[in-house]
Amino acid sequence: MQNATKARRYLAVKYSTDLISNEYKSGTRVTQPKSWLITTLVLALSLLMAASAFAQQGQGQPEEDASVVPSAQTAANLMLAATTVRTESGFLSLGFNPVTAFTPTTFVCPPTHKAGCTLLVDVSAGIWNVSPSSVAQIVIKISGPGAAVDPNSLVNVSVNTGPLAEAATFQFMKRQIPAGSIQTVNIYFKVGLQGASANTGFRTATAQFYLN
């Protein structure tokens, strides 16, 4: 990904340089550049900025990383078996190391239900004072056999640098949970950069356990 980013930056700079050099002939500077030149220079600058943004995508957003193959998963015709809702109002200061956001929640897929189970987790929180250039993140870990957490176990949820909380929410799914298995849900919050910080307070986690 680093080489691809360098290539994008090189092309953007080269494109804008070539455009300028074409407007210089025999050492004479064009004092009134054409409107099309200004437009294309703006587009070239936009390309350069996009390349820079692409280079930062890997910081805490693995589902946008080029090394992760995009996929779409579906769990259909589910029957709700159990729901647990947890709320917290205590202040949490977030750093680079994950901090526990909720008490763990445990479910058991019935041994007699051979089709297995599916777990859906919805997390919402008010987040504020995120350090500039960083991002607040939710990390979810679900112990027990089954498929990996979809769409990913780590997601960016807020870049709110202001002093007032803004609500952020995300849903996670775990499929292919075998009959008789125990599933424990742990939810953590963190920020994406070393030395950065953020705050959270009011937050809710809803875990829904379905029979396939």
Image: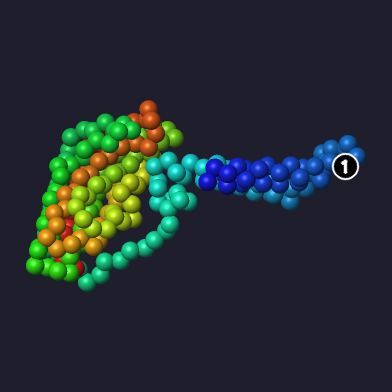
Q: How many marks?
A: 1
Tell me, yes or no, if residue 128 can be seen here.
no
Residue 87: x %, y % from top left: 16, 44
Q: Nearer the viewer, residue 157 or 36?
A: 157
Residue 36: x %, y % from top left: 74, 51
Residue indicated by mark 1: 25
Question: Eyeballing the image, is 48 above or below 147?
Answer: above
Tell me, yes or no, if residue 3 can be seen here.
yes
Q: Residue furthest top?
A: 195
In the rendered view, does 61 fall on the left or right side of 204?
A: right
In the rendered view, does 105 fall on the left or right side of 50?
A: left
Q: Residue furthest bottom?
A: 77
Q: Nearer the viewer, residue 35 or 186?
A: 186
Amino acid identity at mark 1: Lys
At 30% across and 49% down in the image, what residue appears? 153
Residue 141: x %, y % from top left: 24, 47
Label 1 sits on a secondary structure element that is loop
In the rendered view, does 22 fall on the left or right side of 192?
A: right
Quarter where residue 148 is shown: bottom left
Residue 137: x %, y % from top left: 33, 42
At 45% across and 44% down in the image, what residue appears? 58
Quadrant containing the C terminus in the rendered view? bottom left
At 48% across and 41% down in the image, what residue appears? 56
At 14% across and 42% down in the image, what residue appears? 103
